[in-house]
Amino acid sequence: MVIVARKVGIYTRISRDDEGDAMGVARQQQDCERLADLRSWQAVKVYEDNDVSAFKRNVVRDEFELMLNDLRSGLIHGIIAYDLDRLARQPRDLERLIEIYDERPKAEFATVTNDVNLGTPDGRTMARIMVAFANKSSHDASRRIKRKHLELAQQGKDSGGPAPYGWRKDDRTKVDPDAAQAIREAQQEILAGVRIGTIRTRWQEEGLGNPRAGTKRMAHHHVEHILTNPRLVGYRTYHGEILTGDDGEPIKGEWKPINTLAEWEAVCAAIAERKQQRPGKMLARKYLLSGIARCGLCKTKIRGQVNPRWKTGSKAAKFSYQCSVVNGGCGKVGRVGDPVDKLIAELVLEEQHEKAAARGVPIEQQWPREGELDAVQADISQLLEAEKSKQITVSTLLQLLPTKEKERDELKLERARFYKDQKQAEAREAAGDLSLAEFFDLPIERQREIVLQSLSAVIIHPAGRGRRIFDPALIDPIWR
Ligand SMILES: [Zn+2]
């Protein structure tokens, strides 16, 4: 008589739930194979779900599903798993499995830990109890943790975890002065027109921000978040939303803020405005006067480009501003770029220095409608209070509240714009004191912004054939 070994499938799974119990799939599989040998079964297939939680309800475990099908169709005669926990933690999954064992009473079942046997009625009852318990405790645990987090947030308590950039690693309530300085500088740059992408590049080079361990890379949205985080003004957030108290005011955390409200609102408004104006990516420009310079003959916008003729001639690639047929120009006017940039920068800085001197020191101004905003806030608190103490009904509250909320939001937006304009003006003011070297050290967008403050265009006139010496008289700045 020939004994044909029973064919079984091995099921393995790692889940992030397995804390401190990182039973690798490889080891699970080895143990299951050994068990198959002991029983004289033939392990024909391994079903491996990686990093999928069997507890989370909305997660589909592909291999688990495949295994159920194979078992149902008789392709395999049984299952081996490390333990019940890895196999099924949702009652729904367990019931589907049990259903198959009900239909196929001869199907094999074994776990390495021998915690349960689905092949017997008693084992199934046991399994149901075990899964029900595991399920309840998992649910309770996660509900309890969530509630605790919200509770702490509402009290303005800090959440755990690594310190956000700007605060000290050993104490999240204290400001890290260097990081805070880097944030403030970057915010100033944003207000002066620098792109987030430029700040990201610089931070990556200098090791600033919060790059992921082992790499220097940071995502764009990550940098944006660091610069606009409500935490900068002490606001407590929960799942990205600013939490408000019973009085409708934002809840303040226990940590030291890095920004004043005016600074923070200005940066948020500037970034939001830029997104609106220029959806998608802001164009990264390479040359100071690209699109600012125009051809003296055809008046078409001129861009900077590396000239291959010079590129081959010298080590340092020189660039030129060249009227181009491709861009709809005449193609007849071009000039070596560097002297043009230097000339324009000198002229612009000189003009801005004179202007700044004439204006004197700017006075920091308070937004004039702060009192109005306070009054609206007070109205809102009063309404909420009145409903709470049953002086008015919920429906009355909901009739009155939206108007007041709209008023408040509009005022807040106006305040943000006011401070944004003010901060931007301050940033511009600072340009008047720059030396030429400092100017050229700035990010290119910032340089361009400064130029555009003073000039609407730069006309480059044709130089005539064979002229080698740069003639400033042929560069014509158009002042605003
Ligand atoms: Zn032209």
Image (spheres, rainbow, N blue to C red):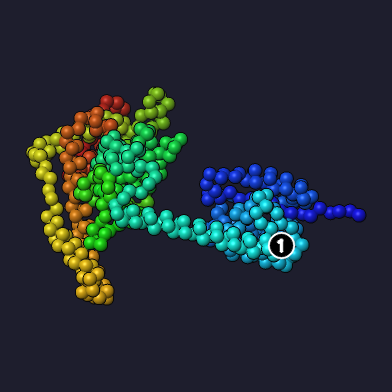
Q: Is residue 375 above or below residue 257?
A: below
Tell me the residue at 12%/38% (across/down).
356
Q: Position of residue 437 (x, y in %)?
A: 24, 28
Q: Position of residue 363 (x, y in %)?
A: 10, 44
Q: Does the image show residue 388?
A: yes
* Residue linked to disc 1: 120
Residue 165 vs residue 98, the one in the foreground: 98
Q: Is residue 306 above or below residue 456?
A: above
Tell me the residue at 12%/55% (across/down).
368
Residue 234 vs residue 194, the one in the foreground: 234
Q: Position of residue 9 (x, y in %)?
A: 71, 53
Residue placed furthest toward the right = 1
Mark 1: secondary structure:
loop
Residue 285 vs residue 333, the one in the foreground: 285
Tell me the residue at 40%/23% (across/down).
315
Direction from residue 120 to residue 213 in the image, left or right: left
Q: Is residue 469 above or below residue 57?
A: above
Q: Tag 1: residue type?
A: Thr
Q: Quadrant of the C terminus?
A: top left
Tell me the residue at 30%/45% (across/down).
227
